[in-house]
């Protein structure tokens, strides 16, 4: 459920950085678990206020939230479009960002409650998007993406992934608060369509154009697959729509590639072929049609 970080701190959307800092100091002094032990409601309000302060004290992240690019937890909002390469969300280092440790030291002293387990909070998860080629999605691959602050990491794309799959990179998200564990990076994959291949479960389908001579006499032709071209046999008297199967040439080597033959006549026509058909003894033969 969505929540409002400004409301959590009790400040307006036009609040200055100092006003945000003062509001958080007041709430931390009032709600900190060392001040109100065993008060679950106060503890939850304190956690929410801390999360709101983390968001609004970072000028870059606050700007992205105000523009609707991230939600109150710093996660990327869906944009209903994809693009190449990863996009990052969540906090970024900024010289003007506040230090929670300084605030807790002010409130409780350098050895006070600010360093205790009550204030240890897991970092936020950061969301990224990555477009993957159809062949890489079918076979699996490794891709390097840029995380926040210029960090780079190699991502293993398992064979057979589909659009919408989210890869979780443990401990690659936002930093924890007061020694808490870091969050994770969540990478959502989008598989680009391929000009020739179509996925059908574990199988891959391909329309293969063949010439009239290849269809009538049969031939050995090359067919593309996700692991490279292979030679296959077209039987004599092949018709458009005939399906041929290449075993083990599907997704991740588990499925097959189903090849549908498409007989192509010469573009623009051919006078010699036309004359042949006119004088062909079986020119009046008609293929059986299911509708009669």
Image (spheres, rainbow, N blue to C red):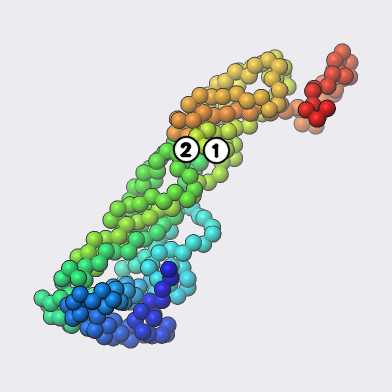
Q: Position of residue 250 (x, y in %)?
A: 50, 31
22 to 73, vertically: above or below:
below
Q: Position of residue 21 (x, y in %)?
A: 29, 83
Nearer to us in this view, 3 or 152? 3
Q: Residues within 10 Å of mark 1 (few under 14, many from 20)?
A: some
- Asked if disc 1 and disc 2 are in contact, CB closer than 8 Å, the reply is yes
User: Dot 1 corresponds to which residue?
Assistant: 199
Nearer to us in this view, 285 or 233? 285
Q: Position of residue 81 (x, y in %)?
A: 54, 58
Left or right: where does residue 47 sit relative to residue 238? left
Which secondary structure lies at badge 2? helix
Q: Residue at x 32, y 64 (%)?
A: 124
Disc 1 to disc 2, how far (Cα)? 9 Å
User: Dot 2 corresponds to which residue?
Assistant: 138
Quick check: can you spot residue 25? no
Q: Which mark is residue 191?
A: none
Nearer to us in this view, 288 or 101? 288
Q: Position of residue 61 (x, y in %)?
A: 38, 71
236 to 223, vertically: above or below:
above
Number of labels in the image equals 2
């Amino acid at each position: 459920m969505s929540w409002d970080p400004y409301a959590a701190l009790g400040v307006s959307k036009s609040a200055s950085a100092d006003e945000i800092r003062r509001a958080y100091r007041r709430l931390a002094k009032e709600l900190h678990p060392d001040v109100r032990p065993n008060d679950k409601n106060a503890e939850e309000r304190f956690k929410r206020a801390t999360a709101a302060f983390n968001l609004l004290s970072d000028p870059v992240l606050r700007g992205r939230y105000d523009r609707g690019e991230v939600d109150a937890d710093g996660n990327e909002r869906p944009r209903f479009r994809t693009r190449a390469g990863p996009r990052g969300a969540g906090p970024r280092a900024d010289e003007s960002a506040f230090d929670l440790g300084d605030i807790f030291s002010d409130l409780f002293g350098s050895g006070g409650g600010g360093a205790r387990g009550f204030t240890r909070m897991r970092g936020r998860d950061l969301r990224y998007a990555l477009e993957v080629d159809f062949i890489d999605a079918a076979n699996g691959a490794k891709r390097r993406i840029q995380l926040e602050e210029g960090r780079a990491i190699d991502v293993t794309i398992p064979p057979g992934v589909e659009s919408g799959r989210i890869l979780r990179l443990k401990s690659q998200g936002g930093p924890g608060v007061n020694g808490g564990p870091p969050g994770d990076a969540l990478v959502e994959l989008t598989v680009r369509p391929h000009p020739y291949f179509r996925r059908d479960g574990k199988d891959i389908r391909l329309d293969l154009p063949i010439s009239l001579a290849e269809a009538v006499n049969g031939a050995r032709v090359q067919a593309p697959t996700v692991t490279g071209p292979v030679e296959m046999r077209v039987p004599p008297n092949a018709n458009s729509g005939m399906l041929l199967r290449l075993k083990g040439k599907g997704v991740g080597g588990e499925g097959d590639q189903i090849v549908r033959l498409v007989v192509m006549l010469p573009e623009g026509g051919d006078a010699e072929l036309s004359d042949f058909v006119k004088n062909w003894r079986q020119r009046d033969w008609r293929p059986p049609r299911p509708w009669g």
